Image (cartoon, rainbow, N blue to C red):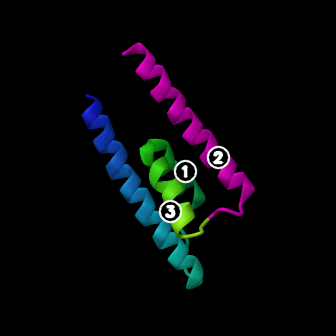
Amino acid sequence: MRDTVLIVYAVVSLVTFVTYGLDKRAARLNRRRVPEARLHLFELLGGWPGALMAQQIFAHKRRKLRFMLVTFLITAAHLAVWVWAWDRA
C-alpha cells in the first residue's frame, strides 16, 4: 500500500513540476497561464513535492505571499497525515 502511495506522489509531483514549468514559460511569453487553483489542486492531490522543487528551480510563484501560504498549508497537511499514519503503523 505504501509503495502505491509513493508512486502516486511521484507521478503527481512530476505532473505538477511540469505544469509549473509550462506556466513559467507562458508567463515569460505573455501567453495564457495555468490557473492558480489548478496548481493548488495538483499540490493537494500529492504533487506538493514537485511544486516545491519547481518553485525553486523555475523561481516561480515565490513572491506571491498568498499563493505560498496556500502551498505551505497543503504541504503541512500532507506531512501531518504522513506523521499520523507513521505513528499508527
Q: CA distance from mark 3 to mark 1?
A: 13 Å
Q: Secondary structure at mark 1?
A: helix
| Prevailing secondary structure of the magenta residues | helix
Q: Residues within 10 Å of mark 3 (few under 14, many from 20)?
A: many
| The magenta stretch spans residue 10 | no
Which residue is painted at 44% across and 43% down in the image? 45
Residue 68 visible in the current orientation: yes
**Image position of 22 with respect to 61: above or below:** below
Which residue is painted at 46% across and 72% down in the image? 22
According to the image, label 2 marks what residue?
70
The numbered dot on residue 40 is 1
User: In the rendered structure, are the residues bearing label 2 and label 1 in contact, judged by CB atoms less than 8 Å apart?
Assistant: yes
Q: Secondary structure at mark 3?
A: helix
**Image position of 40 with respect to 87: above or below:** below
Sequence-wise, the earlier of marks 2 and 1 is 1
Relative horizontal placement of residue 31, taking residue 69 as reference (left or right): left
Sequence-wise, the earlier of marks 3 and 2 is 3
Relative horizontal placement of residue 40, taking residue 10 as reference (left or right): right
Relative horizontal placement of residue 71, taking residue 54 as reference (left or right): right
Three-letter amino acid code of the residue under disc 3: Ala
Q: Residues within 10 Å of mark 1 (few under 14, many from 20)?
A: many
Q: Which residues are magenta?
A: 61-89
Q: Residue furthest top?
A: 88
Three-letter amino acid code of the residue under disc 2: Val
